[in-house]
Image: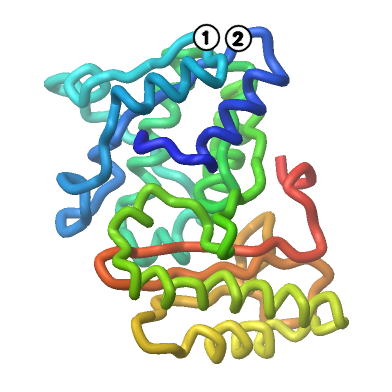
Amino acid sequence: MGALHKGHASLIERAVRENDLAVVSIFVNPTQFGPHEDFAAYPRDESADLSICERLGAAMVFAPTADEMYPAGDATRVQPGPIAARLEGAARPGHFAGVATVVTKLFAIVRPDVAYFGQKDFQQLRVVQTMSRDLRLGVRVAGCPIVRDADGLAMSSRNRYLSADDRRAALALSRALLGASEDWSRGERDPAKLRDRVRRDTAVPGIALEYVSVADPLTLDELERPAERAVVSLAARVGQARLIDNVLLGIGLEELA
């Protein structure tokens, strides 16, 4: 959605490296924002984004207007399945219908062979992978690792909303996920204990935790018993920003497609 940072750059670099032609779409999609969310304030810097795409070797940029993507009379929407109903889907009603619809439109217009999505929006990655499979869209949806700043914070366009104090508080999010990962490495498989660890480590001033999930990484069904693979994810309000982050345990991104 623009306001490109090093996380986005990693997607573009991989697309350039692995394909004859790399196309970047830049579109702040209004249908995935709720009525009280930050659509109007969402960071936008098209000229800087175009410069980054050119420098990284993208062959072209598709940057449509809202009227081009949703002309008068446009009424068809793509409703994703159960994988979109929980977590971000529950917190942001209608969000994933907006995501699924715009991604289907972008796939239909650009006709890519492969599309690259970041792990940071893990549920979005799984929604799009599942949608592409179920609707036989013929697009391989590849997941790319989270890119973090040196202090561990997952890169996000919404990090621009953080004050210096907010940013210091936000570091507890990635530290909590790292702690859960370390517990997993020591043999912990009880999802309740992993959730408690993350909740405990994020109980700091400045963080309003919305949810902690320990789920199956393929279905996003919440785990109630020990398992040999999991995704630990969270969402929290920090100052003016709503941040999400996650860590994969016992499975790699390449196993998700």
Q: How far from the left and from the top, in percent, is residue 254?
A: 77, 42
Check disc 2 and report its element: helix, strand or loop. Answer: loop
Residue under the point 51% across and 77% down: 172
Residue under the point 26% across and 36% down: 44
Residue under the point 40% across and 72% down: 236
User: Considering only vertical position in the picture, is 130 above or below 196?
Assistant: above
Q: Which of the pair 114/220 is nearer the observer?
A: 114
Placement of the C terminus among the 4 image quadrants: top right
Give the Cα distance between marks 1 and 2.
6 Å
Residue under the point 32% across and 60% down: 92
Q: Name the residue under label 2.
A: 21
- Pointers 1 and 2 in contact (C-beta within 8 Å): yes
Q: Which of the pair 253/223 is nearer the observer?
A: 253
* Colour setting: rainbow
Local packing at callout 1 (Cα closer than 10 Å; few below 14, some 14-19, many 20+) is: few
Q: In this view, does 176 lie to the left or right of 203?
A: right
Q: Name the residue under label 1.
A: 59
Q: Residue 3 carries which label?
A: none
User: Considering only vertical position in the picture, is 136 above or below 145?
Assistant: above
Q: How far from the left and from the top, in percent, is residue 213?
A: 56, 74
Q: In this view, does 190 lie to the left or right of 210?
A: right
Q: The residue under label 1 is which amino acid type?
A: Ala
Check disc 1 and report its element: helix, strand or loop. Answer: loop
Q: Which of the pair 133/46 is nearer the observer?
A: 46
